[in-house]
Image (cartoon, grey):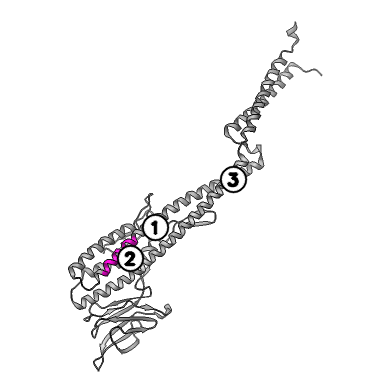
Amino acid sequence: MRISTTQMTNAGVREMLLRQAELQYTQLQLATQKRVLTPSDDPVAATSISFLQTEISQLEQFNVNGDAAKASNELEESVLTGTTDILFRIRSLMVNMGNGTYGKEEIGSIAVEINERLGQLFGLANTQNSNGDYLFAGSKVKSQPFVRDANNNVIYNGDQNQRVIRVSSGVITPVSDPGFDVFMNIKNGNGKFVTGSNAANTGTGLMNTGSYQAPPAFLAEPYTITFGVNASGVKTYTVTGDTSGSTIIAATPWQEGDAISFNGITTSISGQPEAGDTFSITPSSAEDLFSTIQSVIDAAEAFVDTPAARAHFANVINSAQETLDQQMENIDVVRGKIGSRLNAIESENNSNLSLLVTSKSALSDVQDLDVVEASTRFSQQLVILEAAQASFVRVQGLNLFNFL
């Protein structure tokens, strides 16, 4: 069979192009440090690479989320620590205010500081993060959560939603707490009932904040304790239900410090209440932190230095202290939850980092190039290409016209 010059030329060109393509592919592998450049190179490996890249991207995003959640919770923890410090100071001032020895001027001075501290609390409750989002606004992060109305009452403008973020495939963690749960929705008094005295009382009776031992269903209505004097001149007390109008305890002789117990409620009254004086026991209801502190300021500003007024003032302060203790305990509970969240976030971040190292190692095994092997192959392919080029030149010279 005769082979034409054209056929030899075409065959030589094809061989050189093939060798050049192989060389260029190896060059590209060396430049990218990747063994698999297209799915057709290794379909099985390409599938594994795609899966591992997706997994790595997801794990990296989880860690970004974890860092954001950690920063937000640490900010909230810092704010609540500052809040607790202020509340401890306010409680100390309340104790001083109710010690029974300060006059109107001293009580007024204490009220000024409490008012300043209240302003600090208001500022902390409206804390913003580095993005300008309000920390305690729930999901309404661009709206100031706490504002004052025309009567100087603090109103919550946020919602009760808790913002969350995913920090791993199976864990979603909160990044903050709504201000309603932190500052607003706390039971007053001892958590079951709140005690109080009538401002019109003429005696010096001081009511204990009391305790509650019965199921909640028994505290079905508010109660009033009324003092009187029986025919023998002995001081008595009567307990009646405000809603039902029924007599819970009929007129019973009273001595200072006697326990007054009924329907699971136990309290006592010290001092010297007068006939006609009344004291109240009301089922606990939600009371915000700002209102509790404001009630102390209002009582201080209205303080009158008479024995009966001092007794009423002391009752107001005692009740406010009991409520403040509930509110401080609530903040401690929230701080405990934040601590648990931070521990969970750290644990998940560590787990994600471990998985990330494993996934990247697996990806490297499947995708990365053996540089030594590729360099050796590149040298061989270069030699082969040069040989093909030299052969092509020599073959092109095999022509009879060269001998004529």
The answer to whether residue 327 is left or right of residue 172 is left
**Given contact means CB atoms under 8 Å apart, are the residues at marks 2 and 3 in contact?**
no
Within 10 Å of the Cα at label 2, are there few (<14), some (14-19), or many (20+) other Cα atoms? many
Residue 208 coordinates in the image, percent (x, y):
31, 78
In the image, farthest residue toward the bottom: 232
Residue 294 against residue 38 in the figure, above or below: below
Alpha-carbon distance for marks 2 and 3? 51 Å
The answer to whether residue 330 is left or right of residue 43 is left
Q: What are the residue bounds of the magenta stretch?
A: 83-95
Residue 100 coordinates in the image, percent (x, y):
22, 74
The answer to whether residue 35 is left or right of residue 243 is right
Rendering quarter of residue 206: bottom left
Question: Residue at 66% across / 39% down in the picture?
Answer: 42
Q: Which residue is mark 1?
A: 77
Within 10 Å of the Cα at label 1, are there few (<14), some (14-19), or many (20+) other Cα atoms? many
Residue 182 coordinates in the image, percent (x, y):
38, 63
**Mark closer to the chain start, 3 or 1:** 3
Quadrant (top left/top right/bottom left/bottom right) for the N terminus: top right
Circle 1 — which element?
Answer: helix
Given residues 356 and 299, the one toward you in this image is 356
Residue 88 inside the magenta-drawn segment:
yes
Circle 3 — which element?
Answer: helix
**Mark closer to the chain start, 2 or 1:** 1
Alpha-carbon distance for marks 3 and 1? 37 Å
* Residue 52 tag number: 3
Within 10 Å of the Cα at label 3, are there few (<14), some (14-19), or many (20+) other Cα atoms? many
Residue 311 against residue 44 in the figure, above or below: below
Residue type at mark 1: give it. Glu
Q: Which residue is mark 2?
A: 289
